[in-house]
Image: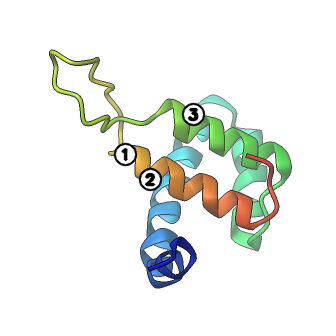
Amino acid sequence: MSDERMRQENAPADRRTVARLVAAWLAETERHDPEAAGQARDGWERGALSERAAQDLATWVTARVTDTGFTEDEGPYVAGAVRITPSDKDTVHAWLRARGHAV
């Protein structure tokens, strides 16, 4: 099965992953920069994140990967409010690229 076909079949799951992580990102951003969070939330609700918001989301999801698959002996545990796997990060990045953002 091609990657594209797999992505199409998993699109609802991808959308749920993106929505879950965007909600966490917006909540965290709200605590640190309410104005930026408001602008990003407006863009998200319109279905069009600004380039700045898209880059912030891409950076945030990369930095917040919490489920690395490592044991305590193999690598650090990253605490976070939500579970984010490397696959989740890839899903968000692909979602952003599909909307024309350079990630």
Q: Is residue 73 above or below residue 84?
A: above
- Distance from label 1 to label 2 (Cα)? 5 Å
Q: Nearer the viewer, residue 6 or 21?
A: 6
For label 1, the residue is 85
Q: Secondary structure at mark 1?
A: loop
Q: Amino acid at mark 2?
A: Asp
Left or right position of 97 against 80: right
Question: Which residue occupies 64% across, 43% down?
Answer: 58
Between disc 1 and disc 3, whose residue precedes?
Answer: 3
Left or right position of 69 against 47: left
- Circle 1 residues within 10 Å: few <14, some 14–19, many ≥20: some
Q: Amino acid at mark 3?
A: Arg
Q: Is residue 39 above or below residue 20?
A: above
Q: Secondary structure at mark 2?
A: helix
Q: Amino acid at mark 1?
A: Thr
Q: Is residue 4 above or below residue 54?
A: below
Question: Which residue occupies 63% across, 63% down?
Answer: 95
Question: Which residue occupies 52% across, 58% down?
Answer: 91
Question: Marks 2 and 1: in contact by CB < 8 Å?
Answer: yes
Question: Which residue occupies 45% across, 60% down?
Answer: 20
Residue 88: numbered disc: 2
- The residue mark sitting in front, 3 or 2, is 2
For label 3, the residue is 31
Residue 33 percent location from the top left of the image: 69, 33
